[in-house]
Image (tube, rainbow, N blue to C red):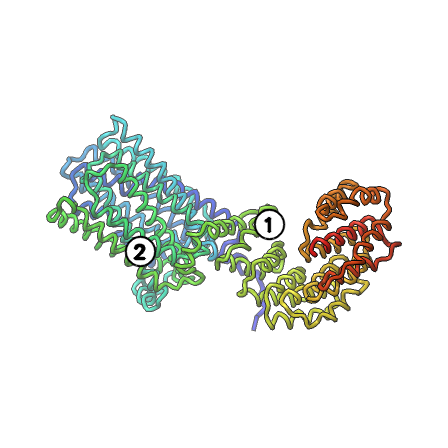
Amino acid sequence: MLVAVTTDNIPMKSKYLSQKEKSVGLAEYLKHSTYNGLGINFLANTTVYLMAIHYGASNLQLGYISSVIHLSGVILIFLPKLINGLNLVKVHYYAWVFRGLICIFYGLLFFTPDRNAVVLILKVYTAFCLIRTVGIPLGQPIQQSLTSQNSIGEFVAKLLNRFHSMNLLSNTISFIVLSAKFFETITGLIFIQFLGVAANAMASHHIKKVPCRESVVYKSGRNIFFLLKKNLTKREPATVLIIHWLTLSSMILMSFSIPFLRKIIMMPDNMVFAYSFVASLAAVFSGYLIKPFVDRIGSRPIMILSSAFLAILSLGWAFIPIDIPWGLIFLLSFLTLFSQGLTVILAGRLMLKMIPEKDKITYTSMVHFFSAIVALVLGLFGGYLINLGEVISSSHFHDYSLVFLLLGISALGIIVSSYFLEDRGSLSVRETTQILLSTRNLKAYLDLYQFNLTSNPVKKKTILLAIGDSDTNVATEEIRRILKNPLSAEKGEILKSLFARPRKVLLDEIVQEASDVHSYHRSQAIFALGAYPNTKVEQALIAFLDDTSPDIRSSAAKSLARVGNVSKLEKVVKLSKSPSNKIWERMNFFIAISIMDKSGRYLSELFKTAATNGGDSSTQAILSLSSRLLEMSPPLSEIYQLENEQSLKGVKRLLDEAKEIQIFNKQGKIIKEDFASGDFVNIFEWCCSILADVNFDDYRKHLKNSIVSQSPETLNLSTALATLYFTYQTLKIG
């Protein structure tokens, strides 16, 4: 029972954002992601790796650097309680401000002895990661508040595209800086860190401007361990968590490629940044490629395919010769990180969808806390595998081979886990492959994506034709979505396409539309039913013959004939003679009767039917239609078209076709003169005299009767031309 309340003391706005606020917030968050992509690449992995290598860091220390950005998540066990009640965006803002400022301390490397430099780097980078970790769990709930469930995948792809596009720029800048002689040493790497501090400040500025009324909510007892247990006991949440951690594992293991290139392949610092540029390019490319697919196809099928490709490519890294040309390394890295980029986007989509309405921060803290444990174990284990690789390395097996083999195992783990993923609405691997490997289906799918973006009605209509021609489930679901829309301008075109390309799975929707007496597109739906021979359809169409609207009755008659039901021929003939029928209804009934009446008896009244309640254009339409239904050539409509363009032009075309028959060839000049003078009676009598001595035993006898039974007084140019045309056609066929 609802209780009436006053709003004097009730805030009018809830924690949920309005569409306008979402639009503003989305724009600011994308700007934040832009500067964040620029800053993090200056401040984190590659630069820190190179600084540590410069001072002779050990394999375990490099493994720590690889994992500490995730390892720092251990503080998340306390974080939800510490920041309880604070605004999400404010906490995120201050975390980002301080994580940038801490990096200024890298400047102390100029004054630190070499033996202590690695320790300083590890301390500053650990502090950076810890402060960053305070803001990281807040990012996903903020993102979730700015988008909808139906567009999460596209949003994640767009976000990562911004991020990685700026990575491209930062890697280019880093390459240029380190290529300069002055910056060849540690000076260049520290200068890059200061550039990152500036970019990070801009990222902080824009995150502060994102609208947010949500605060951190922590409930006693509902800590990260409680949520872990709760989620691991349910199939879908547990599968998503496992996929997330396996994806994280693949990222950590792939990050070992940087020290591998620097220490084993012996790439200089500037070329390592060139490698990072290629890696970012691959990530951007994967984002742009997957954006049209991710929300409609789903995560599961593409994740299986991309992870399978990643598993294969990991073998390339494991057994790569150390003297391989760098160009091939860049190609291998592009393909590997492209595959990994797809997996990251898809896993991010799943994780964002899985965040619960309650316990948001505790949930994301739980995810990142246990991610930290995974990162610690994997980072240190990776360092151990490198040490082990140094012992067993051979001409075909380098120091990092075991690390990259483990990368392949993690990719296989993602494949196996994906098979247990429900991901409602997701296509199967087979259906996805059918889309990706068929140029026609792929084009239709991409057209479908463009259809929802464009507002151009002409372009929409063109795209609809492509969608209607696609036999994919995605196209079918889009058509179903359009049919369910009560105000869709495209519904009429879609219903027409369902006649040209029947989809039995949509029959119930078509019947429902056809039965709705208030539907604007009812007649198109009835037209579409003509492609679905089915008892249910026949019963519906027979019922529609009693409708009060001539349009509905005629459409039902035509579709009833097309599904092969001839039981109502007499009723359809009777309905066709109603004086209320307009040209459209008359043509529909004519088509229906022509299909139902196998003997062709209806042709006995062809000219009478054509002349009933209509002007010259109506007469031409009915007579042309009969020519088309009888598959006569050239079409009578073409003869009329030429005659309507210029006097005697159609007559000349007809006589040119008919000269194959001797009598037409001999009388051609006289016939032309009769048309020129308007002596239509003479033409009619001449045709009757020719047909008088010819007998037919098929539909032509009815056509002959219709020709000769005309009243000379009713003849005009259109009927005289048709009389000559059908006389020629009956003789030509004979």
Counting from the top left corner in percent of width and height, residue 409 is at 25, 56
Q: Secondary structure at mark 1?
A: helix
Dot label at residue 461: 1
- Is any part of residue 74 visible from this angle? no
Residue beneath disc 2: 368
Counting from the top left corner in percent of width and height, residue 158 is at 43, 47
Earlier sequence position, callout 1 versus callout 2: 2
Counting from the top left corner in percent of width and height, residue 200 is at 36, 40
Occupied quadrant, residue 599: bottom right
- Specify whether 479 is left or right of 434: right
User: In front of the other: label 1 or label 2?
Assistant: 1
- Specify whether 206 is left or right of 571: left
The residue type indicated by label 2 comes to His
Distance from disc 1 to disc 2, alpha carbons, whole Å, reads 47 Å
Report the quarter where the N terminus lies: bottom right
Out of 561 and 503, give the one closest to the viewer.
561
The residue type indicated by label 1 comes to Lys
Q: Residue at 18% of width from left, 49% of height from top? A: 383
Q: Crowdedness of circle 2 by 10 Å Cα count: few (<14), some, many (20+)?
A: many
- Specify whether 389 is left or right of 633: left
Q: How many marks?
A: 2
The outermost residue toward the top is 181
Q: Residue at 34% of width from left, 65% of height from top? A: 231
